Image: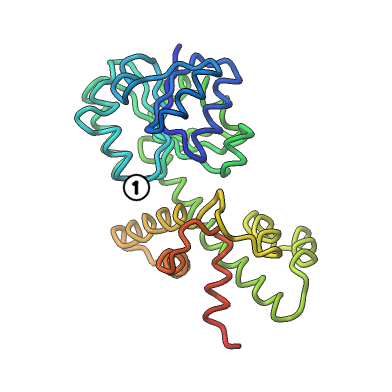
Amino acid sequence: MTVGFIGLGNMGQGMVDNLLEKGADLTVFTRTQSKIEAMIDRGAKGATSVADLARSVDVVLVCLPDIRTSRDLLLGEDGVIANAKPGQIVVDHSTVDIATSRACAEAAELKGVHFLDAPISGGPGGAAGGTLAIMVGGNEDAFETAYEYLGKMGANVKLMGPSGAGTAMKLINQLLVGINTVAAAEAFALANSAGIDITAAADLLTVSWGNSVMAARSAPITATRDFANSAAPVRNLDKDMGIIKDLARDEGLSLELALKSYEMFHHMIEQGNTEHDIAGVLEIIEERSKN
């Protein structure tokens, strides 16, 4: 089988690196021609457009930055699904809303195409290392076929249920990422106020109930205050928490911690710190604290 990949951003580049290094017959497309040429130099094929890629491979993988881009490239008149062939598999690794994933699945079904919503977690490091968690929604047979490629990019690949289940699971994960990042920032603000070294606090937390992945991740970044120009910028989590906010409204769910966390990340965006690391929410806590 052949595979195509659309989107060579912070996550997509590491994912295609693993596909190529692990023997996939790979075709790529992205808006930046130099990135396509770099992959061609390494042995991949280059497509001239989304439609060109969709028509030339058996499995199409996409990893895109936001809902609008996903809808345009997947559902547009000259997009992936419009140019897909019966029996083809289309996999969306983007973080979108459940409605978008279900709309893609319905459009694909009308063409006899299999659609999998398969968002990812693990950050750029997980993408580069091939250790991503990939949570998938859709048809089990299509999942088993696509696993040949998903397994080259992820160490934890799981079918969560029917269409939309992968996206729902990613939003559950992002809800916890957002809340735990804010909780860690509050803990480190308290540590600073009490004169406790953050690195020492983080070491103790590793053997305490208060530990979390986000606390462990945020500690060294917070200790050095290395917030600027992050590979995990707040704009990404702000987008995801915004989707959760809308989902809470639509489903009538009381997600108070999630909504407060979203408000704090969005305040970072309003301050112009879109590329700041998510751990930089510490600065919002400090700004709102009494001197």
State the image coordinates of residue 288 (x, y, percent, origin top left): 52, 81
Badge 1 density bin: few <14, some 14–19, many ≥20, Cα 10 Å = many
Residue closest to the eye, 205 or 42 = 42
Work out whether residue 140 or residue 197 is closer to the camera in this orientation and state it.
197
x 32%, y 41%: residue: 69
Residue kind at label 1, given as amino acid type: Asp
63 w.r.t. 204: above or below: above
Question: Which quadrant is the N terminus positioned in?
Answer: top left
Q: Secondary structure at mark 1?
A: loop
Q: Dot 1 corresponds to which residue? A: 97
Residue 137 visible in the shown view: no
Q: x, y percentage for residue 42?
A: 56, 18
Which residue is painted at 58% across and 62% down in the image?
Answer: 279
Task: Write the residue at 53% across / 31% down.
Answer: 15
| The C terminus: image quadrant | bottom right
Vertical position of residue 10 compared to residue 18: above or below? below
Percent across and percent down for residue 160 are: 46, 37
**Residue 28 pos. (x, y %):** 43, 23
User: Where 203 falls versus 156 (above or below)?
Assistant: below
Q: Is residue 171 visible?
A: yes
Please tell me whether residue 275 is drawn above or below residue 168 in the rendered image: below
Q: Residue furthest top?
A: 1
